[in-house]
Image (cartoon, coloured by chain):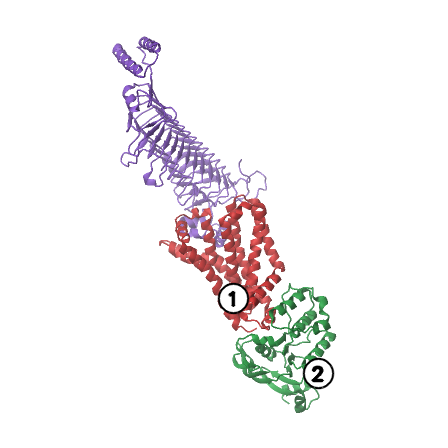
């Protein structure tokens, strides 16, 4: 579904991504891991068109991303920090995004129901807790039945119950054939969801393959230790 | 001599009375008797001029009349070329007969003393730049009275030269030219003394009232409005007084120049608004008094150039562009107990020194306090803003009027005066305005 | 186009509930009310409103605009991850801020006038005041958006905004005064017309001053200005300048915004 060729991104003197090439197949679930400032978010933002590549190209379903915007109809994005116009209510935000994505015909309200978000609908966003905002954020990402879900640190800030509800939803959508990319800087947190693992370090891909392959090749019992062994070079 | 005179008079009056028509013979004979009885005293007689009378023209009566006679003129239009009056007669219009100059000639020239002209409508004296055509011109005469006439569309209205002790009262003058050069003055005096100009209304002339080399005269209760140049133009005229006049919306306001001992009080100078307009322009004036006048909405209320010992007190200056513009060559002038209310600039000057004094004035811009409660502010007021100094040096800087930058400059200068004259301040500014 | 309207509507909706816009409206309400109470002279009221408008509107617009863009960065990212064109979002944000600011100025000044000084409503200087307010807001929001898009450093951006305001409102006039002084022996009127057209604050100030009777104070200079600005050419050039000041920063900002990394 996504093909990235020699992607390079510089911010000033700093290389955020160096010659990143990878492919993400349709229906796959990819765990993008790496420490802070390793380039995860930059990579995601490049796919979303929020960051303009310095070099290289990104193709989505064969279409090269080059300032076009309609392809984002296929994407549901849950950013790391949820920020909304402070003075609008939850309902207004949901309606607004619905309004802006008018091509979508069927909506997925499952998460809203599960989070029981309706009772917050009349509240203004500035009066919501960080966790609730994150829930709104997640609901918006799933609302439009997108083929591709990009979730940046999805469970950060969520309480355990909501967190497991979200995980269930991710698995369900994966089973429905959706392509999913998610990140976390706490490796163990979403390990259970991962099939494909892409490990980024200092802007470069250090590992790209299935989780089993990673664990087998490093001969460690879990993802965290496997990654640690790559980082230390053992 | 007497009898000779008597016979002459007798003949004239007989002639006159006979021709006046078919009057009652009794009254005629009575008159004749009375006349003969009074031969030693020269009597005043009346003549009637009108289209139905023996005298159809004023000119014909002027030939017939003698000093002291009265000529009554009936309603009608009289076009008689220039009437030259060499006898001391009273010429009185009944119902405003029209004397027209047909846009060609002067209407009336008075060359005799003790003439009275009343109740006429003078119109259309032609424009003549060599002779300064006037509706009524008085030359080298005294004790004449011009009153209650209407002057319309004349080049000059009333023109007096070398006259003395004349009175110009209750006349109404209006002219309609729009160009200064094609317009003459309303009431024009040159080399006169002891004149009284009172209660006239002058509108649309070049200068409403013009004084040059006039002495000991009074201008009172006149209204000079919408004249093209000055409402009052006043030069080399010492020891005159003008009071209770209204000068409104004149092209350049009122100019008083090269004069000593003028008394200007209780006048209103209003709406003299425009690039070159002044409420009152003073040039080379000394030992004069300006008091209890109202200056409202003039571009510049009073402009002082080369003025000395002029005492300006108890006037109201409101909503003028600049209330007082004081040039460097003016000294020893006193400004006291005036109200300065909402003027864009209270005082402006082109000098960093000032030898004039301001005291006990009320300034609406004053922001000081009065702790000892004596009615006067405890800190002095500096009426000159830095910006007004800049403008004096550099007129184009006026485009910065109302710029924030200018406001900041003014505040800074107010705190640390460096360019505004240090001595130009009101040490005891009044807290409340004078009523 | 439809999307643009939607964005504008949501922005207006959001901003109209913000406390700052309420303060801004109430400020004009109190100011206008106070002016009417203290002065009966209508042209004085308009003149004072104009003075405040020429100082406050650029300052508020430029700071509000800069802060607004910085504070809403995450929200912008949220919208940009939807299928929305960047140009449209930029325009939407811009108009969504300009419209409430202008309305706030209009409402704040109009309400007291309607209730207390109704005959002033039909005066041409008032119309001029509103046009001035409209242009000042659109120009300075446009400049603030450019500044905030150009650099991501919030402190630097705010500093630049305040500096830009100082430049237009104060420093420029200082430089003009300096120039007038240096070249005082030359006929400066034409050059001054040129320089005043270049600065939108000066231009607005002079245009409105010329419409009021204080113009007579400006003597010969005023007459030259009046003669120029009363011609069709003068009016055309003024409107062109104000429009250019709105549109050029907007276009540059939009281009920057389109290429920007979030």
Q: Position of residue B270 (x, y in %)?
A: 45, 38
Structural crowding at the residue carrying mark 2, measured as other residues with C-alpha within 10 Å and reported as few (<14), some (14–19) or many (≥20): few
Quick one: which residue is furthest to the right in this view? A161
Look at mark 1 in the image and give the residue it sits on: C146
Residue A50 visible in the snapshot: no
Please name which of the two marks, 2 or 1, marks the residue nearer to the observer: 2
Disc 2 is attached to a residue of which chain? A
**Figure chain in red:** C
- Horizontal and vertical percent for residue C153? 56, 69
Residue A127 figure quarter:
bottom right
Judge from the rendering whether residue C132 lies leftward or rightward of residue A213; answer left or right: left
Q: Is residue B84 above or below residue B365?
A: above
Q: Chain of mark 1?
A: C
Q: Is residue B405 visible?
A: yes
Residue matched to label 2: A192
Q: Nearer the viewer, residue A117 or A228?
A: A117
Look at the image and tell me in which quarter the C terminus of chain A lies.
bottom right
The lab-note entry on whether marks 2 and 1 share a chain reads no
Residue sitting at the far front: B22
* Chain painted green: A
Alpha carbon separation for disc pair 2 and 1: 46 Å
User: Which residue is found at the position 61% from the left and 61% from the top?
Assistant: C13
Q: Which chain is purple?
A: B
């Amino acid at each position: 579904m996504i093909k990235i060729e020699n992607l390079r991104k510089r911010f000033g003197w700093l290389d955020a991504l160096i010659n990143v090439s990878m492919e993400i197949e349709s229906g796959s679930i990819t765990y993008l891991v790496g420490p802070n400032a390793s380039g995860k978010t930059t990579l995601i933002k490049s796919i979303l068109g929020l960051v303009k590549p310095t070099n290289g190209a990104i193709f989505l379903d064969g279409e090269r991303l080059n300032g076009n915007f309609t392809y984002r109809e296929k994407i549901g994005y849950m950013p790391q920090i949820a920020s909304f116009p402070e003075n609008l209510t939850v309902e207004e935000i949901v309606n607004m995004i619905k309004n802006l994505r008018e091509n979508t015909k069927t909506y997925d309200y499952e998460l809203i129901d599960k989070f029981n978000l309706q009772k917050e609908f009349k509240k203004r966003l500035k009066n919501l807790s960080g966790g609730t905002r994150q829930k709104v954020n997640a609901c918006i990402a799933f609302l439009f039945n997108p083929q591709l879900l990009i979730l940046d640190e999805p469970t950060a800030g969520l309480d355990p119950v909501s967190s497991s509800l979200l995980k269930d939803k991710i698995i369900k959508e994966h089973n429905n054939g959706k392509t999913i990319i998610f990140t976390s800087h706490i490796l163990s947190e979403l390990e259970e969801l991962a099939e494909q693992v892409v490990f980024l370090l200092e802007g470069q891909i250090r590992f790209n393959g299935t989780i089993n392959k990673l664990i087998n090749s490093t001969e460690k019992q879990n993802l965290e230790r496997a990654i640690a062994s790559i980082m230390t070079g053992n | 001599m007497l009898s000779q005179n008597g016979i002459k008079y007798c003949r004239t009056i007989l002639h006159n009375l006979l021709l006046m028509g078919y009057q009652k013979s009794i009254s005629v004979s009575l008159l004749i008797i009375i006349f003969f009885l009074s031969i030693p005293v020269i009597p005043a007689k009346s003549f009637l001029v009108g289209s139905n009378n023996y005298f159809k023209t004023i000119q014909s009566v002027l030939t017939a009349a003698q000093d002291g006679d009265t000529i009554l003129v009936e309603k009608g239009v009289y076009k008689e070329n220039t009437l030259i009056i060499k006898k001391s007669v009273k010429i009185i219009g009944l119902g405003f007969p029209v004397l027209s100059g047909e846009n060609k000639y002067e209407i009336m020239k008075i060359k005799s003393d003790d003439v009275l002209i009343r109740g006429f409508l003078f119109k259309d004296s032609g424009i003549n730049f060599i002779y300064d055509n006037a509706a009524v011109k008085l030359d080298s005469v005294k004790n004449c009275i011009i009153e209650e006439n209407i002057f319309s569309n004349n080049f000059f209205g009333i023109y007096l030269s070398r006259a003395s002790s004349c009175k110009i009262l209750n006349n109404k003058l209006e002219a309609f030219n729009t160009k200064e050069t094609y317009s003459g003055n309303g009431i024009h005096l040159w080399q006169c003394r002891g004149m009284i100009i009172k209660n006239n209304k002058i509108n649309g002339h070049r200068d409403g009232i013009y004084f040059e080399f006039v002495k000991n005269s009074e201008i009172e209760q006149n209204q000079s409005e919408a004249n093209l140049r000055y409402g009052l133009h006043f030069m080399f005229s010492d020891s005159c007084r003008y009071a209770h006049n209204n000068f409104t919306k004149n092209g350049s306001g009122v100019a008083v120049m090269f004069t000593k001992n003028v008394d200007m009080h209780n006048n209103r100078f209003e709406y003299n608004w425009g690039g070159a307009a002044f409420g009152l322009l003073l040039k080379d004036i000394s030992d004069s008094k300006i008091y209890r006048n109202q200056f409202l909405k003039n571009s510049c209320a009073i402009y002082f150039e080369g003025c000395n010992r002029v005492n300006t007190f108890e006037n109201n200056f409101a909503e003028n562009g600049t209330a007082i513009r004081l040039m460097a060559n003016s000294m020893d002038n006193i400004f006291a107990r005036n109200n300065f209310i909402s003027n864009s600039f209270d005082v402006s000057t082109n000098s960093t020194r000032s030898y004039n004094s301001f005291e006990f004035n009320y300034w609406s811009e004053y922001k000081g306090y009065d702790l000892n409660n004596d009615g006067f502010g405890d800190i002095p007021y500096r009426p000159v803003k830095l910006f007004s100094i800049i403008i004096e040096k550099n007129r184009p800087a006026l485009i910065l009027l109302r710029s924030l930058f200018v406001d900041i400059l003014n505040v800074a200068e107010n705190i640390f005066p460096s360019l505004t004259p240090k001595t130009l301040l009101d040490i005891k500014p009044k807290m409340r305005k004078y009523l | 186009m439809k999307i643009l309207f939607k964005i504008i509507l949501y922005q207006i909706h959001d901003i109209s509930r913000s406390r700052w816009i309420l303060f801004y409206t109430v400020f004009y309400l109190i100011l206008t009310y106070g002016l009417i109470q203290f002065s009966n002279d209508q042209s004085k009221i308009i003149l004072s409103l104009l003075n405040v408008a020429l100082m406050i509107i650029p300052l508020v617009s430029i700071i509000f605009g800069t802060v607004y863009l910085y504070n809403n960065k995450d929200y912008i990212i949220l919208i940009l991850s939807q299928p929305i064109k960047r140009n449209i979002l930029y325009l939407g944000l811009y108009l969504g801020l300009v419209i409430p600011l202008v309305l706030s100025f209009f409402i704040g000044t109009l309400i007291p006038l309607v209730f207390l000084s109704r005959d002033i409503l039909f005066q041409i200087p008032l119309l001029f005041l509103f046009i001035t307010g409209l242009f000042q807001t659109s120009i300075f929001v446009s400049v603030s958006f450019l500044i905030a898009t150009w650099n991501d450093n919030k402190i630097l951006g705010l500093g630049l905004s305040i500096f830009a305001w100082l430049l237009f409102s104060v420093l420029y006039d200082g430089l003009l005064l300096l120039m007038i002084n240096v070249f005082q022996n030359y006929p400066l009127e034409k050059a001054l017309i040129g320089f005043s057209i270049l600065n939108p604050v000066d231009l607005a100030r002079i245009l409105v001053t010329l419409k009021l009777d204080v113009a007579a104070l400006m003597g010969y200079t005023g007459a030259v200005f009046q003669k120029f600005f009363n011609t069709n050419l003068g009016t055309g050039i003024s409107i062109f300048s104000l429009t250019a000041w709105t549109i050029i920063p907007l276009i540059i900002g939009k281009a920057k915004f389109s290429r920007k990394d979030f």
